[in-house]
Every structure is written in structure tokens, then in C-alpha cells.
Image: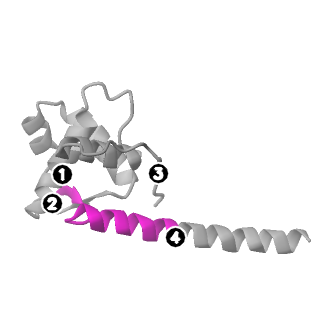
């Protein structure tokens, strides 16, 4: 399974409120884009963050009803979040891959280090075979 990891270096406002901090974190991880005019992906993400703290999964129907979004919109955003590796599907529901955001960031760092290690090995092998 492919995982798309996007990291953006964005300017962080000094002392933002919790929503601004979550928005910055999500934007830095490439989770949200400008086409999301009603911040529906951000809202789905927030719902999953809250549920993770309570160790609860949520179905796409639950999230859609809670946020007053169509199930299709919620499934679209859940699929995108699963493609990033941040969200997993278990027991018929969705949940963040870790209960704490710090652990998610640490996991992503390990994932990226593993990807770069493999890239370096392949690049070295190619260089050796070309010479």
C-alpha cells in the first residue's frame, strides 16, 4: 500500500488558539487544501482527534451526521486521510493511527526516515551499476 506523506514548511503564528494550532499542524502535514472551502476535511480531522482521545472509532455515517456533511464528502476526506497514513479503519470505523498527535508526528518521522533510507540504497545501487 502506498502512503503519501506531504510536509510543508509553513510560518507558524506565535500564540494561536487550539483551532489555529490544529489548522497549522494539518496544513503542515498537507492534509487540507484550498479547495476545501467549508473546511470539511479539517472538521473531519478534528472529529477524529476528539474521538482518538476517547479511544472511540467513528463510522462515516456518524461523522457525516455530526458535521452535517454528506456521507460522500466524509468518505472522500477519510480516504485522503487514510492515504496519508494518519487515519486507519478498524472495527467498521475510523480512528487516528495513534491516540496522541505527538505520536502521529513521531510515526510520520520514522516512516519518512525509512523511505529515505530505501531511496538512498536504491540510488547508491543505481550509481554503482551506471559506473
Label 3, on which residue?
A: 7
Q: Are the residues tagged 4 and 3 within 8 Å (C-beta)?
A: no
Picture residue at 61% right of the left edge, 71% below the top: 118
Q: Secondary structure at mark 1?
A: helix
Query: Number of labelled discs?
Result: 4
State the separation of the CA atoms marked 4 and 3. Answer: 13 Å
Picture residue at 36% right of the left edge, 45% below the top: 12
Q: Nearer the viewer, mark 2 or mark 3?
A: 3
Label 1, on which residue?
A: 48
Q: Are the residues tagged 2 and 3 within 8 Å (C-beta)?
A: no
Q: Nearer the viewer, residue 64 or 117?
A: 117
User: Residue 100: horizontal and vertical position, in percent?
Assistant: 21, 65
Between disc 4 and disc 1, whose residue precedes? 1
**What is the quadrant of residue 53 in the picture?**
bottom left
Q: Nearer the viewer, mark 3 or mark 1?
A: 3
Q: Nearer the viewer, residue 12 or 54?
A: 12
State the separation of the CA atoms marked 2 and 4. Answer: 25 Å
**Residue 103 magenta-drawn?**
yes
Picture residue at 46% right of the left edge, 54% below the top: 5
Return the mark for residue 113. Answer: 4
Q: Nearer the viewer, residue 56 or 38?
A: 38
State the separation of the CA atoms marked 2 and 3. Answer: 22 Å
Label 2, on which residue?
A: 52
- Which color scheme is applied? one colour
Please report the bounds of the magenta region as a residue range: 92-112
Amino acid at each position: 500500500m502506498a502512503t503519501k506523506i506531504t510536509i510543508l514548511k509553513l510560518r507558524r503564528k506565535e500564540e494561536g488558539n487550539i483551532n489555529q494550532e490544529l489548522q497549522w499542524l494539518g496544513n503542515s502535514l498537507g492534509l487540507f487544501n484550498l479547495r476545501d472551502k467549508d473546511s470539511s476535511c479539517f472538521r473531519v480531522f478534528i472529529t477524529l482527534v476528539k474521538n482518538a482521545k476517547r479511544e472511540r472509532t467513528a463510522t462515516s455515517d456518524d461523522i457525516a451526521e455530526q458535521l452535517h456533511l454528506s456521507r460522500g464528502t466524509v468518505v472522500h476526506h477519510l480516504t485522503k486521510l487514510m492515504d496519508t497514513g494518519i487515519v486507519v479503519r478498524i472495527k467498521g470505523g475510523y480512528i487516528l493511527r495513534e491516540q496522541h498527535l505527538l505520536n502521529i508526528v513521531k510515526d510520520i518521522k520514522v516512516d519518512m526516515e525509512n523511505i529515505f533510507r530505501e531511496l538512498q540504497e536504491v540510488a547508491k545501487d543505481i550509481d554503482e551499476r551506471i559506473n
